[in-house]
Image (spheres, grey):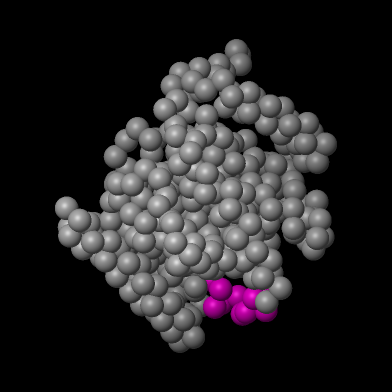
Amino acid sequence: MAAPQLSGPFFESRAFRLWYGGMMIVWAVLFASLASFAFLLDHWHYPAIMVLGAFVAGLTPEGGGAVAFPVLSIFLEIKRETARDFSLMIQSIGMTSASIWILTRKGRNIAAYAPVVWFIPCGFAGFVIGMALLQTIPVTIIQALFLSLILTFALAYVSGQHRGDRPILMASGMKDKAMLGCVLVLGGMCASLFGTGADIVLYTALLTRFRMDEKIATHMSIMVMAALSILGYAYRLYWDGGINDYQIATWLCAYPVVLLMAPLGSYILHRLDVEWMLRAIVALNLFQMAYFNLKNPGLEKLAWSAGFSVVLFTIFWFSLAHMARTGKQDG
């Protein structure tokens, strides 16, 4: 059978073709050394999960961890720390691949993404703080917080009139920069708990406070989460020594899936109206929340889920509603 050709609009960038081909060679070498096809067959659910997870990562402001973390931690009952690490590890490939595609496609405005350079250290500082201070929070509370975060964000995003139009970030004063710094630190702390989340809080700030074009804001959030995933993976591997051979093998099982699917999601975002996909994500998040509360039901679970959901939805809804009112006044 002939090898697939890297051609067509999706592979129009020579730099992306080189990246994709080079990373597939890296995968083949690592897979041959550290995993096996027998292991892949036994752990087929990891790449299966990431078919959807990586697509969501490239298409929306939610990272692939928004699918990987709840499936592994809640549905498959894998340790929360392992699910968090897998989210970081897999996003380090998928969201980086999406970022390379974004930065090398025709017609891109590199200058629009310049703020990402200082976003990254702020987010990583939050990740380190979270690793030091937040890891003893009970897992039920962390799971309830995560599901509430992705559900309420998706509901507010789909139902709100929140479309910005500014192609670049206009944050001139110290107040704006301080607010963005706090948002990024908070996002990094979220990533230390579930391996994702920094992209959601950053995207919300870029849209509501700074009225940025939603596709540019999505791209920036993808790039920041990609960098935090790489740094978080490196932190866990080299500083904590918390990544084992089994985790690396599962990462390699899903690696080629996310390498393609995450930039494919960005490609579709660039070309199509994706409202139908966003509604599907809301349905998925509703199902995850229902499953969490119905599996081994308890008052504590329900209280945390309801409390977080009310607070977070209120924050997202009023932020997006304020943006819509401001837009009408400007118009």
Residue 262: in sight, yes or no?
Answer: no
Extreme residue in the front direction: 173
Residue 290: in sight, yes or no?
Answer: yes
Please provide percent x and percent y for residue 205: 41, 61
Residue stretch rendered in magenta on the structure:
134-143
Please provide percent x and percent y for residue 128: 69, 66
Using the image as rendered, state which of residue 132 and residue 264 is in the foreground: 132
Q: At x 45% / y 41%, what residue is drawn? A: 112
Please identify the quadrant where the N terminus is shown: top right
Q: Is residue 137 magenta?
A: yes
Q: At x 68% / y 27%, what residue is drawn? A: 22
Please provide percent x and percent y for residue 306: 39, 79
- Decide: is 248 above or below 236: above
Q: Quadrant of residue 206?
A: bottom left
Using the image as rendered, state which of residue 293 and residue 175 is in the foreground: 175
Extreme residue in the top direction: 2
Is residue 10 rendered to the left or right of residue 43?
left
Q: At x 49% / y 43%, what residue is drawn? A: 113
